[in-house]
Image: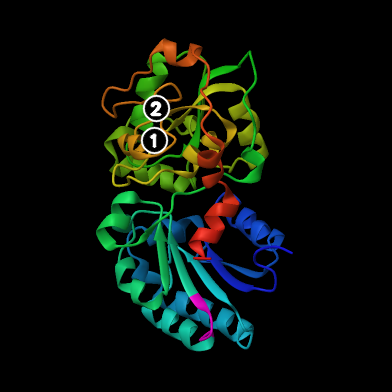
Amino acid sequence: MGILTGKKILFFSQYFFGYEKKITEKMKELGAEVSLYDEMSVNTSFERAMLKVSPRIFKGKTEKYYRNIINKEKGVPFDFVLFIDCEMPTMHVLQECRRAFSSAKFCLHMWDSIKNLKGVKGKFEFFDYISSFDREDSEREHLVFRPLFFSDEYRACDDKENYKYNLSFIGTIHSDRYRIIKKLKRTTDEFFIYSYLQSKFIYYFYKMTKKDFRKTNIRDFKFDKIDSKTIADIVRESRGVLDIQHPKQTGLTMRTLEMLGMKKKFVTTNTDIRNYDFFDENNICIIDRVNPVVPDSFYTSNYKDISKDIYERYSIERWLLEVLGV
């Protein structure tokens, strides 16, 4: 019998590198019945690019998309309705959801910072329980603070002696990420880089609008998503892993917690990581965004284990139970 045995959960999440499936699988493993839907009503690269201009462009499409879901699921006695970020639903959509699933506990988990999601604060009134991965947002808005997680596949002890790479980076290129990666590449040998962009359209859009992209070559970027097994294999071949958080974000990225799960050395631009219970300078190197440097000694020293209690706090199971408030 799992902790969520018999519970029915309606789950809305962006389809993002398979994390929505991992969360769904964990819910089911804990005994729940789950209906999973993409939180996004748009799915083409062009639409997602336009979404960054204004979500209101897709108001009509979004409301039709959610109306179909509500009509399909209406009558199911859900115990929980869980949204991740709630970027696309309009106020009208949320009103309709509350009417259709009136007996459910509505939960919202923010795994993006509030300032990055236009209008999301106005939607808070529709939720019974709100948590955030961002420590500063949690304090400012009186939300439950809950950092992200590592999934079970990242439970691995790093006991390798020989590595293929000193450092690896796998991630979507945004803000100043490309510039920082270029600077680090000049100072770090054996650096694996997988710079992902959602489409070639976005590449050319950035090339016209972003200074850092003016002298770039399209061959420097990847347009195919990399699967989680390949990511894990590359990470295992790396002494350290690089993470560059969005400048407007202080919350820890998923990559940060995955590396905690794998007991990997970690290089990050996020200075707020000093405030977390697992921080250890032996394991985590904070770099400057303008002048990023990683000392050679960081790669040569061994990883220092943290306590089991702290380690388990960041598991996907603990995360899930906390974002549902159970």
Instruction: Name the residue located 36 percent from the left edge and 67 percent from the top edge.
Output: 55
For label 2, the SS is helix
Image spot of residue 23 (x, y percent): 60, 57
Crowding near the residue tagged with mark 2, few <14, some 14–19, many ≥20 C-alpha atoms within 10 Å: many
- Callout 1 environment at 10 Å: few (<14), some (14 to 19), or many (20+)? many
Question: Looking at the picture, does residue 223 appear above or below residue 217?
Answer: below
Q: Which residue is mark 2?
A: 181
Residue occupying the point 34% across, 32% down: 269
Residue 144 location, quadrant: bottom left
For residue 80, above or below residue 235? below
Q: Left or right: where does residue 141 sit relative to residue 28?
A: left
Could you tell me the amino acid type at mark 1? Ile
What's the residue at 38%, 18% (across, down)?
294
* Secondary structure mainly formed by the magenta segment: loop
Residue 195 in view here: no
Q: Which residues are magenta?
A: 101-105
Q: Are marks 2 and 1 in contact (CB under 8 Å)?
A: yes
Q: Which residue is mark 1?
A: 244
Q: Is residue 85 magenta?
A: no
